Image (cartoon, coloured by chain):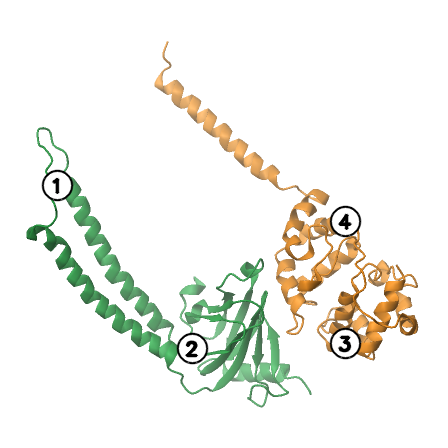
Chain colours: A orange, B green
């Protein structure tokens, strides 16, 4: 017996509706709600510069970020969004990073920071040739916030230094000194750090970075 | 209001006029051509008992369907070319005397604007560098030096109807004269990497007093 036209239409309608529900459901389920899974998905935006493992790429001044604490990654992304970082004409890597941070939604930041924190730090080899012995003395005032072991202190918003690339540490010390970082009203912790860089010469910066590398 | 429809520069209306002229002339011929096509399809549609006829298209009464409109379109082209050259000369080849000069630098993925400080001159110690914010005074003619630090960018201000490529290694000079007070979009119009889509800035057009106050407030003490 041949089915009636109205029956066929109904079947088509039901199937179309089911397909629509499936597509909408898939779209809704396609984006993890939160946590590591969402962070991993969002991190795809970061991989062109920071690499799939978060190891960074010094050729384009993209630092290794793998394994940095979640709180630190969060505050830095928020800092980029607020204009504390990446809004100075001489901070070219920061200018590249800021629009990437701005493109993140506020509630996405914890997820991506959690994912970055879950990656294994790369501990990139040294690229500078500072005097670590002289740097030990220069590091003395840094101990108050970053600790004798260079592992940082969340309460004081001081990040761990030991896993950071030496070229990146030098670059950021110079940024602090020249006002490309830590010079915006409201950036309390950045301003605190900047004060401590004003008296450092380029040589002293290389020395203290060399010392930090020995803390690994 | 749709921001991009506002005309905020001295030549925005000329460019809009040119676009409208091109749209009207080409639109007219588009609809005429489509009308003729559909009329021919309807007029010579398949009919029972009537055989189709092959035509070479070389007969004079047929070639006229091409040659006459062709001639008329060429006449329209002359109007478009004359208007285009006029606008192109005014916007790109003429350089009116500047009241102010600014330097615009594109880099992945931000715009840096170098404004003259309180002394009114560019490339002096009191220049004001601002990222992603261009501050200009209404009804003043500005020259800009457009540069790129890394890859090609394109400085685009939709309300000015201004778009100029920025090429690494070159300093390209252009001009604009803001005519409308307000805050408008600046965008990059040349694919320049993963952050191209968010390489946006704002242009702030203010009156003389407000602009002077901004310059005074932001001129560095050196």
Q: Residues within 10 Å of mark 4 (few under 14, many from 20)?
A: some
Question: Which chain is indicated by disc 1?
Answer: B
SS at circle 4: loop
Q: Residue furthest top?
A: A1
Which is nearer the N-term, disc 1 or disc 2? 1
Cα–Cα span, label 4 and label 1: 72 Å
SS at circle 2: loop
Q: Kindly identify which residue carries mark 2.
A: B179
| Mark 4 or 1: the one toward you | 4
Residue at screen point 50% across, 33% down: A20
SS at circle 3: helix
Does residue A196 appear anywhere in the picture? no
Marks 4 and 3: CB-CB under 8 Å?
Answer: no
In the image, residue A25 sits, relative to residue B188, either above or below, namely above
Q: On the rendered image, what quadrant is the N terminus of chain B found in?
A: bottom left
In which quadrant of the rendered view does residue B160 lie? bottom left
Instruction: Using the image, tell me which numbered label, if any, was put on residue A177.
Output: 3
Question: Which chain is indicated by disc 4?
Answer: A
Same-subunit check for callouts 1 and 2: yes
Cα–Cα span, label 4 and label 3: 31 Å
Residue A50 in picture, x, y percent from top left? 69, 56
Same-subunit check for callouts 2 and 4: no
Residue B145 in picture, x, y percent from top left? 51, 79
Instruction: Using the image, tell me which numbered label, if any, was put on residue A119.
Output: 4
Q: Is residue A103 left or right of residue B137?
A: right
Q: Is residue B129 left or right of residue A5?
A: right
Q: Kindly identify which residue carries mark 1.
A: B43
Cα–Cα span, label 1 and label 3: 81 Å
């Amino acid at each position: 017996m041949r089915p009636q036209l109205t029956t066929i239409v109904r079947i088509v309608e039901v199937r179309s509706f089911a397909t629509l529900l499936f597509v909408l459901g898939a779209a809704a389920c396609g984006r993890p709600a939160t946590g590591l899974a969402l962070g991993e998905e969002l991190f795809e935006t970061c991989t062109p510069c920071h690499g799939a493992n978060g190891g960074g790429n010094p050729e384009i001044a993209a630092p290794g970020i793998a394994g940095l604490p979640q709180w630190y990654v969060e505050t830095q992304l928020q800092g980029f969004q607020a204009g504390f970082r990446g809004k100075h004409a001489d901070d070219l890597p920061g200018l590249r990073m800021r629009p990437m941070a701005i493109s993140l939604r506020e509630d996405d930041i914890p997820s991506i920071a959690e994912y970055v924190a879950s990656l294994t730090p790369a501990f990139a080899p040294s690229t500078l040739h500072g005097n670590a012995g002289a740097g030990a003395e220069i590091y003395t005032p840094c101990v108050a916030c970053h600790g004798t072991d260079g592992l940082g202190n969340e309460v004081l918003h001081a990040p761990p230094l030991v896993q950071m690339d030496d070229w990146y540490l030098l670059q950021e010390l110079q940024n602090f000194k020249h006002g490309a970082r830590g010079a915006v009203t409201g950036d309390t912790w950045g301003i605190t750090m900047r004060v401590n860089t004003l008296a450092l010469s380029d040589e002293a910066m290389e020395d203290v970075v060399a010392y930090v590398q020995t803390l690994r | 209001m749709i921001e991009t429809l506002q005309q905020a520069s001295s030549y925005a209306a000329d460019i809009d006029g040119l676009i409208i002229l091109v749209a009207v002339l080409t639109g007219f011929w588009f609809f005429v051509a489509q009308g003729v096509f559909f009329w021919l399809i309807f007029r010579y549609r398949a009919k029972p008992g009537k055989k189709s006829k092959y035509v070479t298209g070389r007969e004079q009464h047929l070639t006229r369907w091409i040659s006459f409109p062709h001639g008329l379109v060429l006449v329209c082209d002359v109007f478009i070319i004359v208007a285009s050259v006029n606008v192109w000369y005014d916007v790109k080849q003429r350089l009116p005397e500047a009241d102010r000069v600014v330097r615009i630098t594109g880099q992945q993925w931000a715009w840096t604007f170098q404004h003259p400080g309180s002394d009114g001159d560019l490339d002096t110690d009191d220049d004001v560098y601002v990222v992603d914010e261009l501050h200009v005074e209404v009804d003043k003619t500005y020259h800009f030096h457009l540069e790129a630090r890394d890859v090609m960018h394109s400085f685009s201000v939709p309300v000015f109807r201004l778009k100029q490529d920025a090429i690494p290694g070159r300093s390209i000079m252009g001009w604009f004269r803001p005519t409308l007070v307000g805050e408008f979009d600046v965008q990059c119009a040349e694919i320049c990497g993963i952050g191209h889509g968010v390489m946006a800035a704002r242009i702030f057009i203010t009156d003389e007093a407000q602009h002077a106050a901004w310059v005074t407030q932001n001129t560095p003490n050196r």
